[in-house]
Image (cartoon, rainbow, N blue to C red):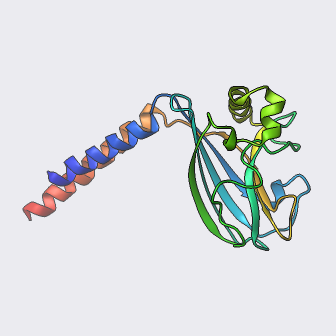
Amino acid sequence: MKLNALLAAGLFAGVASTATAGQSVYTATLDGSSESSPNSSTGTGTAIVTIDSDQLTMRVQESFSNLAAGVTASHIHCCTSAPDTGTAGVATTTPTFTDFPSGVMSGTYDHTFDMTQASSYNSAFITANGSVNGAFQALVAGLNAGTAYANIHSTDFPMGEIRGFLHAAPIPEPETYAMLLAGLGLIGAIARRRNRA
């Protein structure tokens, strides 16, 4: 019984966190073949960008491994002229994200930026969009349109070793939650039977 309650509480907490009002989540898979000039890097990575339009924040989570050389920079570029192709200038903090691991070939990163602060952007991106608010709106529009990408640069690939275009993460269908609940109920029933035996 206690296991069932804990599992249900965990599920509902997970549902609540994915359904937070005002949040949009974007994801990308990073690799060398996605660079503007594709390269043979064996490096791979993932990026998750969460925009909170109520709090005006942007959380950036990245993980990467097997780069050919040490990291020199990471940031988000925006906005290309067409989705999933081309290059664009750096939209976020330059020369790299705040506290991003440097000189390593594998690592993780998790930082939340206050998007009301000019320091969260490349100054050229603010100028191009008229204001900090204009820069925020342009970045969100680029994320929604698939014209913004995450990029990790290294000493061997100064123009970018691995990158990936960011796209809105799919929202689970209600049927998915129903199946999860049914599965948790089954796990709870099995646990109760084992406890009785």
User: What is the x, y in percent for residue 68?
Assistant: 79, 73
The picture places residue 78, in percent across and down from the top left corner, at 79, 39
Q: Residue at x 65, y 55 (%)?
A: 98
Residue 107 spot, x, y in % from top left: 62, 68
From what the image shows, is residue 21 above or below residue 13? above
Compared with 71, 165 (above or below) is above
Q: Is residue 139 visible?
A: yes
Q: Quadrant of residue 165?
A: top right
Which quarter of the rendering shows the C terminus?
Answer: bottom left
- In the image, 140: left or right of 180? right
Q: Nearer the viewer, residue 186 or 8?
A: 8
Count of marks placed on residues = 0
Which residue in the rendered view is the most extreme toward the right? 37
Q: Residue at x 74, y 27 (%)?
A: 131
Using the image, determine if residue 71 lies above or below residue 178. Answer: below
Residue 183 percent coordinates (x, y): 32, 48
Could you tell me which residue is drawn at 14 percent across and 56 percent down? Answer: 192
Q: Is residue 97 left or right of residue 21?
A: right
**Residue 78 visible within the image:** no
Res. 57 image quadrant = top right
Which residue is at 78% across, 74% downward? 69
Q: Considering depth in this image, is 188 or 14 the residue closer to the camera?
A: 14
